[in-house]
Image (cartoon, rainbow, N blue to C red):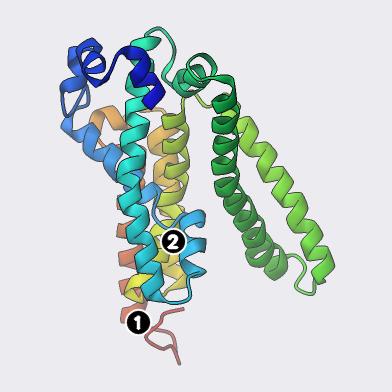
């Protein structure tokens, strides 16, 4: 960021060369679209594996709160720097696609030595996040799907071997997905649409509100996934007709179905059932 601002002639020169539309708080987004994107990123990043694993590794809740608070404060600086880098790239290279802003600046604006340092830092950031997603997905698949339903007596050695294979397959799938994604934001929104309307809300209900009901969770996950798929890839443009994104529609369906099924089974629990409806 500092090198880019220096190349432009300082912060004042950067501000003077920016298009007028970039001084609007909402930009070219409508209020509805802005709120939808805000909720999508809010829910999409909630309890994701990298942050959740680090919180659970804290020695106690106090240290976890301190860590999250410090990380949140650092986030303001991080997003300010990231956004400024995007503006620098817009001024220096107005004809490139947005996803090429960082690579183009690294290639053309940085000295050779700093280029290598920045590339190494970017790879470290990607790896520190990707390994959490890959490992957690492999462990969850073996622990929650393969072992209970396919081979309950699987040995530790075979379990480790399966986790490694699953890890590799998920990594290859992620590479293919990244190659075909139209943009980084679209890729994020698509992954959020598979996470927030399905897994996230039953997990939050169970952990934060002690509402534990396997029937409600499964029904809500299926309903959220179905509504999201129909909303996003169905024959009708429901997003244009209603103003709701697929993620928001899936979240609403998830909450509604979870609440309905939970109340239904809580009102008429099975014999011997406790307050935690199974």
Left or right relative to 159: residue 149? left
Left or right relative to 72: residue 230? right
Q: Position of residue 212 (x, y in %)?
A: 41, 75
Seen at 67% across and 42% down, the residue is: 171
Quadrant that contains the N terminus: top left
Seen at 35% across and 82% down, the residue is: 268
- Residue 40 in sight from this viewpoint: no
Report if the CB atoms under discs 1 and 2 are less than 8 Å apart: no
Q: Earlier in the sequence, mark 1 or mark 2?
A: 2
Residue position marked by numbered label 1 in the rendering: 268
Q: Position of residue 12 (x, y in %)?
A: 21, 17
Q: In the displayed structure, would residue 30 be above or below residue 210?
A: above
Number of the front mark, 1 or 2: 2
- Residue 103 in sight from this viewpoint: yes
Using a 10 Å C-alpha cutoff, classify the residue at mark 2 as few (fewer than 14 neighbours), some (14 to 19) or many (20 or more): some
Q: For the residue labelled by badge 1, is the local secondary structure a helix, a strand or a loop?
A: loop
Which sits in the foreground, 23 or 33?
23
Which sits in the foreground, 110 or 226?
110
Label 1 to label 2: alpha-carbon separation: 17 Å
Q: In the displayed structure, would residue 170 be above or below residue 178?
A: below
Q: For the residue labelled by badge 2, is the local secondary structure a helix, a strand or a loop?
A: helix
Q: Residue furthest bottom?
A: 272
Q: Position of residue 276 (x, y in %)?
A: 40, 82
Which sits in the foreground, 169 or 230?
169
| Res. 219 mark | 2
Quarter-of-image position of residue 113: top right
Q: Position of residue 151 (x, y in %)?
A: 77, 68
Using a 10 Å C-alpha cutoff, classify the residue at mark 1 as few (fewer than 14 neighbours), some (14 to 19) or many (20 or more): few
């Amino acid at each position: 960021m500092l090198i880019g601002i220096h190349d432009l002639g300082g912060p004042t020169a950067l501000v003077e060369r920016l298009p007028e539309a970039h001084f609007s708080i909402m930009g070219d987004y409508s209020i509805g679209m802005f709120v939808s994107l805000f909720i999508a990123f809010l829910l999409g990043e909630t309890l994701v594996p990298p942050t959740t694993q680090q919180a659970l590794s804290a020695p106690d809740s106090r240290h976890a709160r301190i860590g999250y608070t410090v990380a949140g404060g650092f986030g303001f600086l991080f997003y300010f720097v990231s956004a400024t880098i995007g503006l620098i790239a817009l001024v220096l290279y107005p004809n490139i696609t947005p996803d090429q802003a960082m690579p183009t600046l690294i290639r053309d604006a940085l000295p050779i030595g700093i280029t290598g340092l920045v590339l190494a830092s970017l790879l470290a950031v990607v790896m520190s996040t990707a390994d959490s997603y890959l490992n957690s997905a492999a462990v969850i698949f073996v622990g929650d799907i393969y072992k209970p339903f396919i081979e309950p007596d699987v040995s530790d050695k075979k379990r480790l071997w399966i986790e490694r294979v699953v890890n590799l397959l998920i990594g290859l799938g992620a590479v293919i997905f990244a190659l075909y994604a139209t943009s980084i934001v679209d890729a994020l929104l698509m992954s959020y649409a598979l996470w927030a309307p399905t897994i996230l809300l039953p997990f939050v209900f169970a952990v934060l509100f002690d509402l534990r009901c396997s029937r409600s969770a499964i029904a809500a996950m299926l309903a959220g996934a179905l509504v999201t798929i129909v909303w996003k890839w169905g024959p009708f443009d429901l997003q244009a007709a209603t103003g709701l994104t697929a993620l928001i529609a899936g979240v609403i369906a998830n909450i509604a179905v979870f609440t309905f099924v939970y109340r239904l089974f809580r009102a008429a629990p099975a014999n011997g059932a406790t307050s935690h409806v199974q």
